[in-house]
Image (cartoon, grey):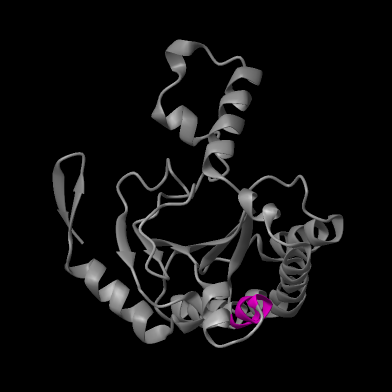
Amino acid sequence: MHIAIIMDGNGRWASRLGLPRTEGHRAGAVRVREIVEESVRRKIEQLTLYCFSSENWKRPQEELDILMNLFREYLKKERQDLVKNDIRFSVIGRRSDIPGDILAEMDESMRLTKNCKGLHLCLAVNYGSRSEIVDAVKKIIDAKIPAGQIDEQCISDHLYTAGMSDPDLLIRTAGELRLSNYLLWQLSYAEIWVSEKCWPEFDVVLFDQALQDFARRKRKFGGLESET
């Protein structure tokens, strides 16, 4: 099973409590650890988290600095636990604009966990789905693939997520009902589950509720029904 999550509402949660928006991001980082641990316990195959969109660079510099520092802290602090828990780590998104030291930390985590067989934890960082599709088209052109050989599988093979399964379930927090330029190609047949709670409030109980609701749904793939 592949679960994708749009972790929304960190700033709103903090503002509601009279805290700086940056404290919402810190609380959100703690929640990431809890949901990753629960995913390992439940033997989820892949968890893809929307951490930082390509549009997020428009945020205030102070907030961006905090977010980048949180990435640094997470990558350094969690690396040994990733290995210990047999979690394979990867990142999708454009590498441009991401500070070089963070890229190095990402690459080191990917190197150390590349042979892990448990949960595949994928972070979407500096990610935008439209940009991903544009980049895929450019790769296909550069590879000089004949038009007659370009089909859905060909495009999938040139996306950032090449080799990954499509998400089965999309979870979005903070009550928003939009995809926000996230995995537009890959989410074609995913089930969607929305929580009114902001991400720092999204605990294991709510995660379990999302999985239980998903298990009760009849999935349709282009008109075909499938029992989960």
On-image quarter of the N terminus? bottom left
Look at 57% across and 80% down and name the residue there.
15
Q: State the image coordinates of residue 91 (x, y, percent, origin top left).
A: 64, 55
Q: Is residue 197 left or right of residue 65?
A: left
On-image quarter of the C terminus? bottom left
145 or 22: which is nearer to us?
22
Q: State the image coordinates of residue 224 (x, y, percent, origin top left).
A: 14, 43
Q: Is residue 189 left or right of residue 130?
A: left
Look at 61% across and 14% down and name the residue there.
144
Res 50 quadrant in image? bottom right
Q: Is residue 68 visible?
A: yes
Look at 82% across and 59% down and name the residue there.
104
Look at 58% across and 70% down and name the residue there.
87
Res 194 quadrant in image? bottom left
Q: Is residue 228 left or right of residue 109?
A: left
Start-end of magenta stretch:
21-27
56 or 48: which is nearer to us?
56
Q: State the image coordinates of residue 82 (x, y, percent, origin top left).
A: 64, 75
Relative to 39, residue 97 above or below: above
- Which secondary structure type mostly characterizes the magenta part of the structure? helix
Q: State the image coordinates of residue 122 (x, y, percent, origin top left).
A: 57, 60
Outermost residue to the right: 101
